[in-house]
């Protein structure tokens, strides 16, 4: 079974960064990653992944059009079983409160602590050992 992680961010270089950080995991087939550059694109991918084992959604908050905070309740309604972690460059208390009240599992600030994110993913994949 393949585990899917959806990353939502309007910055084009984010996909390359995530693929680089998790290249060993992706190559080993521990999980796959899908990328959307807008909240609307993310909703489409969430619906398309209906049969897939979507285990985590990582979403930027500040995006043109629909923000990550606006995407959050829609994503939770479509897939209530899937945790959502919000990512922002502005990790102030108000933003964190809104994200957590909206159903986010956590709020990560940029630059992303990939070691913390890796342990979050590992706990969801339920892996034995770490690909590090």
Image: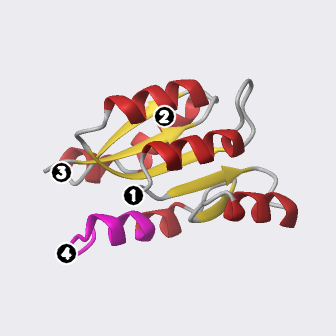
> Dot 1 corresponds to which residue?
81
Q: Is residue 54 left or right of residue 74?
A: left
What's the residue at 41%, 36% (across, down)? 46
In the picture as drawn, the residue positioned furthest to the left comes out as 1
Of the numbered discs 3 and 4, the one sitting upstream in the chain is: 3
Q: CA distance from mark 2 to mark 1?
A: 24 Å
Residue 28: image tag: 3
Name the secondary structure under disc 4: loop
Of the numbered discs 2 and 3, the one sitting upstream in the chain is: 2
Q: CA distance from mark 3 to mark 4?
A: 13 Å
Residue 14: name its quadrant. top right
Of the numbered discs 2 and 1, the one sitting upstream in the chain is: 2
Residue 109: name its quadrant. bottom right
Pick whichever, 32 or 52, lies toward us: 52
Name the secondary structure under disc 1: loop
Q: CA distance from mark 2 to mark 3?
A: 18 Å
Contact flag, marks 2 and 3 (Cβ < 8 Å)? no
In the picture as drawn, the residue positioned furthest to the front comes out as 77
Pick whichever, 22 or 8, lies toward us: 8
Question: Residue 102: image x %, image y %?
Answer: 67, 57
> Dot 2 corresponds to which residue?
15
- Colour scheme employed for the rendering of this structure: secondary structure
Whether 29 is drawn above or below 67: the answer is below
Q: Is residue 37 left or right of residue 93?
A: left
Residue 12: name its quadrant. top right
> Dot 4 corresponds to which residue?
128
Q: CA distance from mark 1 to mark 4?
A: 23 Å
Q: Is residue 83 found inside the magenta-colored segment of the image?
A: no
What is the span of residues highlighted in magenta in the rendered image?
119-132
């Amino acid at each position: 079974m393949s585990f899917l992680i959806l990353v939502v961010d309007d910055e084009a270089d984010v996909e390359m960064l995530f693929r680089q950080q998790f290249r060993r995991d992706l190559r080993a087939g521990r999980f796959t990653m899908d990328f959307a550059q807008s909240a609307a694109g993310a909703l489409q991918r969430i619906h398309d992944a209906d049969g897939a084992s979507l285990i985590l959604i990582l979403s930027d908050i500040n995006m043109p059009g629909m923000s990550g905070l606006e995407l959050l309740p829609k994503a939770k309604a479509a897939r209530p079983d899937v945790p959502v972690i919000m990512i922002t460059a502005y990790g102030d208390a108000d933003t964190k409160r809104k994200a957590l009240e909206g159903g986010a599992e956590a709020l990560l600030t940029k630059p992303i602590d990939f070691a913390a994110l890796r342990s979050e993913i590992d706990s969801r994949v339920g892996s034995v050992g770490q690909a590090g």
